Structures are given as C-alpha cells and as structure tokens.
Amino acid sequence: MHKLTQRYLWLLLFAVIILIFLTAFGYYMLHPVTQQVIPVDITIGDYTGINLDDDAIHFGTLKPGSLAQRPVRLRADAYDVEITLLVEGIPFVFPEQEKIVLRKGEQETIRLFAVTDLLTPRKTYEGRLIILSKAL
C-alpha cells in the first residue's frame, strides 16, 4: 500500500508542475512582451555640440563633468501597457524611470539622462535603449 500511495503523490506532484507550466505559458501567450531597440550615442570631448539627427537618440558631444537629457515619448494607443526601459552599453546613461504603466489613450514623456564626471574618458560611446512593453 505504501508504494501505491507514493506513486499517487508523484503523479499529483507531476500534475501540479504541468498545471503551473501551462498557466504560465497561457499567461505569456495572452500577454506577450514586445521589444523595441533604439540606438543611443554620446561623445565626450572638449566642447559641447548638438546632434539633431532622428536616426537614433543622440546626446551630441559633452564635456566631462556635464549632464544632458533627451526625451522619450511613450504612448498606449490600443490597450493598457506596462513599459520597461533599459539602457545597455553606456554606463552613465539611464532613464529617469525604469518602469511605467500607461492606460489606453495615455502618453508620457520619460527623460534619458547622461551624467558624466570629470574622469569620463573622451571618446564616442554607443549603446541602445531597449523598450519592453507588455499588454495588461
């Protein structure tokens, strides 16, 4: 009788694991995460310069010890959405807010900040802004 009870416990445990997996899979199928990648660049140099090209988020040229910001406009056109902003490749560029929830029809502008110190090496830095969005 003990072996029969043990088999039922293993079967029950297996069924619970499968149920958890199917629930998680179903949730992510109904609420997929989409990703948008936008190039980001900044040059640290001996002068201050502006780059207004629209092919990326350009901070232009900054002197060491400077601060710059660029706006990123986010919209939720069709449904409520949770948005996560990540900056990769440039350690001193970051969003003012990493996560935001927007309701259908809302829009919000989040600023990206570039904060350099006096020891930041003079060169061009390239990275990317990753925008992850998930329908709620």
Image (spheres, rainbow, N blue to C red):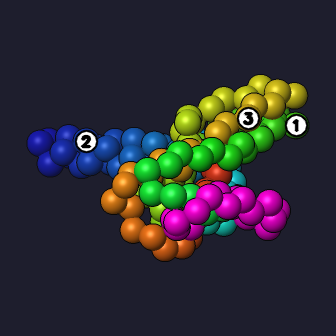
Magenta region includes residue 122: no
Nearest to the eye among marks 2 and 3: give it.
3
Mark 2 and mark 3 lie on one chain; the one further toward the N terminus is 2
Element type at mark 1: loop
- Relative to 82, is 118 above or below? below
The three-letter amino acid code for the residue at tag 3 is Thr
Residue 133 spot, x, y in % from top left: 67, 46
In this view, the mark in front (2 or 1): 1
Picture coordinates of residue 6, whole percent (x, y): 18, 45
| Circle 3: element type | strand
Region in magenta: 43-59
Lateral position of residue 3 relative to residue 132, left or right: left
For the residue pair 29 and 41, the one nearer the viewer reads as: 41
Residue that badge 3 annotates: 109
Q: Earlier in the sequence, mark 1 or mark 3?
A: 1
Crowd rating for badge 2 (residues with CA inside 10 Å; few <14, some 14–19, many 20+): few
- Name the residue carrying label 1: 77
- Could you say whether the residue bearing mark 2 is in a helix, strand or loop? helix
Residue 132 in percent (x, y) is at 63, 50
Q: Are marks 1 and 3 in contact (CB under 8 Å)?
A: no
Q: Is residue 38 or residue 117 the one in the foreground?
A: 117
Amino acid carrying mark 2 in the image: Leu
Q: Quadrant of residue 30?
A: top right
Q: CA distance from mark 1 to mark 3?
A: 15 Å
Query: Residue 44 colored magenta?
Result: yes
Residue 14 tag number: none
- Which residue is at a point 82% across and 27% down the rendered structure image? 106
Q: Which mark is residue 9?
A: 2
